[in-house]
Amino acid sequence: MNIACIAWGSLLWKPQPLKLASGWHPDGPRLPIEFVRQSDDDPELALALCEGAKPVPTYWAWLATGSLDAAREMLRQREQIRPGYPECVGSIPPLDGAEADPRIREWMRSKSIDAVVWTALPAKFDGASGRAPTREEAVAWLDSLQGPQRAKAEDYMRRTPAHIATAYRRLIEQRLGWRPLREAYVTQRS
């Protein structure tokens, strides 16, 4: 079974412990993602799936495993998702009879991919899982950060590929000046 991983954020520049069998390809499915998830451990506003957001390009890479269970577990560990939250790692085929995302299924068929995994963590803001900040709240929170925390949040934003041009990102660039780096993703094996 050939298995791929879809990515759009920090997986691109720090995939470990995810074991990749290829570099990142820039022709992943177009998905609605936005900077709507406050990280649990880092002072960053991470990208997450966000229905209602404009679909943007994503990346994908082959994983160095033929087991969907192993692929899901690698991604769970990489994203530091506690055991017992299987819905936070999306996959096709899905677990437990969940409905497969038709956008991803169609894209898989076009690439002859047997199975795929992706991070399915929800939006989160002010400690409330499922709550997306408004654009103004996102900018205000990022602007309130100082020192190393601000630098880390800025680094995440700048490393995110430029063509992931979301509404929140445009406002963050305008207000904070955090524009993307030229070399924003890793294309080598890890």
Image: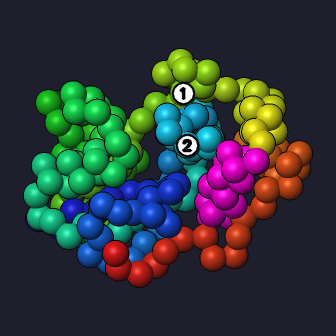
Residues at marks 2 and 1 touching, judged by CB atoms closer than 8 Å: no
Instruction: Identify the element where label 1 is drawn.
Output: strand
Stretch in magenta: 147-164
Say which of 130 and 148 sits in front.
148
With respect to residue 189, does 91 lie above or below? above
Lower position in the chain sequence, tag 2 or tag 1: 2
The C terminus appears in which quarter of the rendering? bottom left
The answer to whether one can see residue 163 in this image is no
Name the spot of residue 26 as percent of width and height, x first: 50, 70
With respect to residue 121, does 29 lie above or below? below
- What main secondary structure does the magenta stretch of the protein show? helix
Q: Which residue sits at x=43%, y=72%?
A: 24
- The amino acid beneath tag 2 is Asp
Q: Is residue 157 magenta?
A: yes
Q: Quadrant of residue 163?
A: bottom right
Q: Nearer the viewer, mark 2 or mark 1?
A: 2
Say which of 54 and 141 sits in front.
141
Name the spot of residue 116 as percent of width and height, x first: 27, 55
Residue linked to disc 2: 42
Residue linked to disc 1: 124
Is 58 left or right of 36, judged from the image as shown? left
Q: Quadrant of residue 61?
A: bottom left
Is 4 left or right of 33, judged from the image as shown? left
Name the spot of residue 39 as percent of width and height, x first: 53, 38
